[in-house]
Amino acid sequence: MQKARRHQIALVAGITAAATALVFTVGTAANAATLFSDDFNDGNASGWSTSGGTWSVSSGAYSQSGTGASAKALAGSTSWTTATASARVRANTFSGSGSRGIGVAARVQSTSSFYALVITPTAVQLRKGATTTLASAPFAATTGTWYTLSLSATGGSLVGSVNGSAVVSASDVSYPTGRAGLLANYTAGTFDDVLVTDAAGLSPSQPPSSPGS
């Protein structure tokens, strides 16, 4: 009887702990306010401003078809501080190597001053501006494959994740506020399901997940 009672107590304790964790998780998620979102299902890109490239909305997604420019699309408020910008991203054509890549941006102050999380054919990079790399990790991005990218900016902390796994991080305080953005640096690509919240992102403790979505 004592053994059975101990088992019941342990079971109740386990259920209570799980319920507490669930409540904490739900509560944390509920505290994240949406600052901006766009799934492009309305057939337009209202609220976006572009620089370089050729941008268009088609089949419920936002595409940039050129490979000859550092193309950017920006949205949101220049006063955003803590923000996590995420989007589904697909590279259709990489033009060459080096700084070529596609990704999302946070704290965009101008077309040359921003933080970005970018995937290339060989790496995932956390960048300051178009070409300065703050952090990098090996990653083989495949054209035609969707990836979910997320860049979190909290104070001086920057964390980038791919498919839900935090892979790169850095500290920098050059840009304390700014808009969100989409980047296609000499790369033709497609974006969808853009979401910007005021919550901090993941901690950089998980390995990158396998390519694909």
Image (spheres, rainbow, N blue to C red):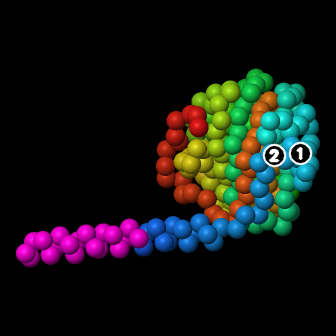
User: Is 90 in the magenta?
Assistant: no
Disc 2 residue crowd, few under 14, some 14–19, many 20+, Cα 10 Å: some
Determine whether 64 is above or below 155 in the image: above
Residue at mark 2: 40
- On-image quarter of the N terminus: bottom left
Q: Is residue 178 left or right of residue 21?
A: right
Q: Is residue 34 visible to the viewer in this orientation of the structure?
A: yes
Q: Residue at x 89, y 45 (%)?
A: 44
Picture coordinates of residue 117, whole percent (x, y): 69, 46
Name the residue carrying label 1: 44
Span of residues in magenta = 1-19
Residue closest to the eye, 115 or 174: 115
Q: Say left or right for 180 vs 84.
A: right
Whether the magenta-drawn stretch holds residue 3 is answered as yes
Q: Work out whether residue 97 or residue 65 is closer to the camera in this orientation and state it.
A: 65
Q: CA distance from mark 2 to mark 1?
A: 6 Å
Question: Which secondary structure class fits the magenta region best?
Answer: helix
